[in-house]
Image (spheres, helix red, strand yellow):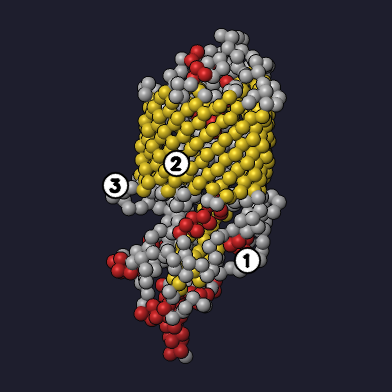
Amino acid sequence: MRIPIIAFLTLAALAGGELAARAIDPSATPTEAEFREGTAEAQRTQREEDEVIGDNLTSNRPSLLFVAKSRSPLTPLNKGGTRNMLKVGLIKGDLGGSRLDDKRHLLSVPVLNSHQSDEVNPTVRDLPASDELAASPEVRAAQLSPRESLSLKSSHNKDFTSLLKTPATIAANAEIPEAVNSNARQLGGTLHITQAGNAEGVYVAEVKIRFVNSRGEAVDKKGNPVEGRISEDFIRGELKLKAGDNYSREVVRSDLQQLQQLGLFDKVTVSIEEVGTDVNVIYNVQERSARSFSVSASLSDDVGVAVPLSYTDRTFGTTPQRLAVELQPSLRGIQYDVQFVSPYVAAEDRLGYSVRAFGDRRISEIFNKDIDLPNGNRVREIRRGGNLRFTRPLGDWQSTLGLNYTNISTRDRNLNIARRDELGNPLTFSGSGVDELYTVSLGAMLDRRDNPFNPTSGSILSLSTEQSIPLGRGNIVSNRLLANYIQYVPVSLLGISESEALPEMLAFNLQAGTVIGDLPPTEAFRLGGRNSVRGYDSGDIGSGRSYFLASGEYRFPVGQDVGGVIFVDFASDLGTGDSVLGKPAVVRDKPGTGAGVGVGVRVRSSFGLIRLDVGVSDSGDLKFILGTKQRF
């Protein structure tokens, strides 16, 4: 019996080695960055977006915050785009969720991204030629033996399942998953193709879907495959790249955009495996939690004690519809934001749409500083309304058509209507303290980023127009035009060729906007603040009919989970401050133009990407901003 046992073990070892050598290694690692409407108008509607306690750091008013966290970011409720809140403390809620489709065919695929980050979203990069491969110590460690190379060349892509480990094979050797994830980190998320330096144009034998955990691994330490609740067939139906196509980076980039807008995934990575002279393309998807809940408590001199509650259900209705609810009861009323989203579904060419209702209270950033109401109260803006929006791609553009209603009123601390400030200047266009806006909006976005989950290069252009209809109080007739452009440029000034989570790059943002026709004072563009010129408080530079904003950042890695930023911001109302009814910026002596410079730190955590910026204005003021996600 001794010889047969030895022979059996030898054959098993050879088989295991062959499978391990053929493993595919996905793990390029950019951070998640959902594009949001980065205009000064968007800043007005995003008082909490990406920041929860940043304002408290620069305010003399008392504020107390206790917050709970959920496992994944909540679906955005804000008009302007994504909302990813930093929350700490009382309750941790991940309510889990049932499977949307149990008809999955699980294949235990070898290597995956193993980086521990909620921000890891690589795209396929250029692949080195075979002679470059031979020089790589990581690749030499995983090089194929002559016997394995021969078997690969003779496969002809017709029976690629022979290259995959079965669950039983993985379980038989507890070290295989660890080795696989180690190789994934070293090789940067792709298997290098021996016959060419780039995968472009190579025949695609199959497109696979792989579910991964928060560490980017498709198998756990016991070798069990990670299971997902979303149907593989549904995900595959959303992809343009199909088996039998030639590989195209542009098509893959388009697929990543489609998967991102579904709102179902925290990150998606793409990796390639060689099958003879062809390739298999693997989309590694990390699902967001099916349901999430958070609760917090705050104390301020405006509303007193408030208890914000948030709930998101990503399995509401049919895949991939979702429901998000946020309530903030306080001693002075309740604020709410409720949104139902059904995104565009490519497989069915189904029109995307969303329905939103909101009620919001804030201290005015237009009528701030030293001029208050006749009774000494600061001006409050109360906004209530809703919208219905439809989305659909038009060629390379993502288009949005919206029908919107907003009721805007100016009030004192006790919510009594306020018509004029203490100098007698009107606060609303109608003069009654209440304006109503009925508008039709049209937006288009051209996304050329290499990976929308975490851009490292490329650009994104957003254009929008919003036409008001003369109905309701004020009979306002106006058109608002907005443009937003972001460019990402990879650099290597520090000699660091790549960083998985926080790559070295230059990032630029240009914004501009104007209003033609009637302009309620509350609708003027606000300049200054955490999403504008850092170093100023929100609205302190000016409020005008038109504006221009430019920001530049140099982003660089410091460690595995830490990065740094050097930034400069500039904004101007283009001399239009005196064209706003009541001249709120002029009478409050706002400069109209301002700049700021500063430094920041980016830290990857279980909350996602946390940012701390320290900005210095051109007037010498120092501001600290704590929030989540990159500035743009």
Q: Secondary structure at mark 1?
A: loop
Task: Please tell me which residue is depicted at 36% across the width and 48% down the height of the picture.
Answer: 490
Q: Nearer the viewer, residue 59 or 388?
A: 388
Front label number (1 vs 2): 2
Mark 3: few/some/many CA within 10 Å (<14, 14-19, 20+): few
Q: Where is residue 25 shown, x and y percent of the image?
A: 43, 64
* Residue hosting label 1: 104
Q: Where is residue 583 shown, x and y percent of the image?
A: 53, 16
Q: Is residue 508 visible?
A: yes
Q: Which mark is residue 486?
A: 2
Task: Please tell me which residue is depicted at 55% across the width and 52% down the height of the picture.
Answer: 395
Q: Which quadrant would residue 237 be assigned to in this image? A: bottom right
Q: Secondary structure at mark 3?
A: loop
As drawn, 544 above or below 11: above
* Residue hosting label 3: 494
Residue type, numbered disc 2: Ile
The numbered mark, 3 or 2, whose residue comes first in the sequence reads 2
